[in-house]
Amino acid sequence: MGAEVLGVDIGGTKIKSGRVMGNRIVDTHLIEVNRDDSEEIALNKVFGAIDELMTDSIRAIGIGVPAVVDPDSGMVYDVQNIPSWTKVPLRRKVQDRYNVPVHINNDANCFALGEKHFGKAMGYSNCVALSLGTGLGMGILVDGKLYNGVLCGAGEVGMIPYKDGIMEHYAGSFFFDEKYGESAKALFRKAMDKDKLALQAYKEYGVHLGEAIKAILYMYAPQAIVLGGSISKAYAFFKESMHETLISFAYQKQLEQTKIETSDLMDAPILGAAALCL
């Protein structure tokens, strides 16, 4: 990637932008976003994240959004964590403001692209990248290329019905807040101090994530699954229970040939959003 581009990751609780040159992020900026933000307020926060890093050398902007997206028109629909964004012509609004090409895709797809171009997915043709954060998002790489599906909606494993809700209620940060009354981050700190309740929380989380991974294995049989997102930092605390859950997967020979790894990229979604500009 020769030109300097801007990658923007619109997450569940924050908007993070990064100026990318070559294969590295040279500067970042972070703005918090709230569920009750109006369409205009949330859009102005996106502009704010871009304004902080925008220079004359930026040749294009890539944006990852936690929603279904029409990559051709740049329209985003039904952003789950910004309910006011039901139908927003995001590419047009950003392009009109900055007068550079703008590319938009689902945020989990951007995470997968980031891993493909810069991280653990580089060596695989068929791979999925699973983002463990506010929700549970997935990007799919088939024959080395991103598979979008209709409106970039492929890979929404977090929306699969599970127990009394959906999968991401149990394999995203919702689980810790609802079941244990504390954030995943707070419980991670306690688990580091060997707090029994925190360790139990992550052990239980690993079981739910293992069930999600079994569904992914049955659907896609990938060569690798790359785990990223904020919760992946606690991998040591849920790895064992996750793998114990996978013992009941029907095709163990297939499982033996699937690598499950954690991302070591600091900002894979930003790098992936920037990779949209390639």
Image: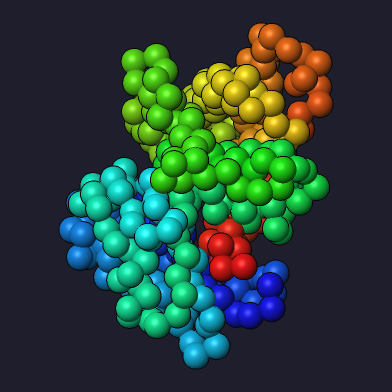
State whether residue 74 is above or below residue 29: above
**The quadrant where residue 183 appears:** top left
What kind of colouring is applied to the model shown?
rainbow
Q: Is residue 252 visible?
A: yes
Name the residue at the bottom extreme.
56
Q: How many marks?
A: 0
**The quadrant where residue 94 appears:** bottom left
Q: Residue at x 30, y 71 (%)?
A: 93
Percent across and percent down for residue 228 are 60, 44
Percent across and percent down for residue 23 are 70, 69
Left or right of 154 on screen, residue 242: right
Percent across and percent down for residue 59 are 54, 81
Left or right of 180 on screen, residue 84: left
Q: Quadrant of the C terminus?
A: bottom right
Q: Residue at x 34, y 28 (%)?
A: 178
State whether residue 160 is above or below residue 248: below
Closer to the camera, 200 or 43? Answer: 43
Percent across and percent down for residue 16 are 45, 64
State whether residue 229 is above or below residue 93: above
Closer to the camera, 112 or 208? Answer: 112
Q: Residue at x 33, y 54 (%)?
A: 76
Left or right of 11 on screen, residue 236: right
Q: Residue at x 38, y 81 (%)?
A: 98
Q: Quadrant of the N terminus?
A: bottom right
Q: Is residue 203 visible?
A: no
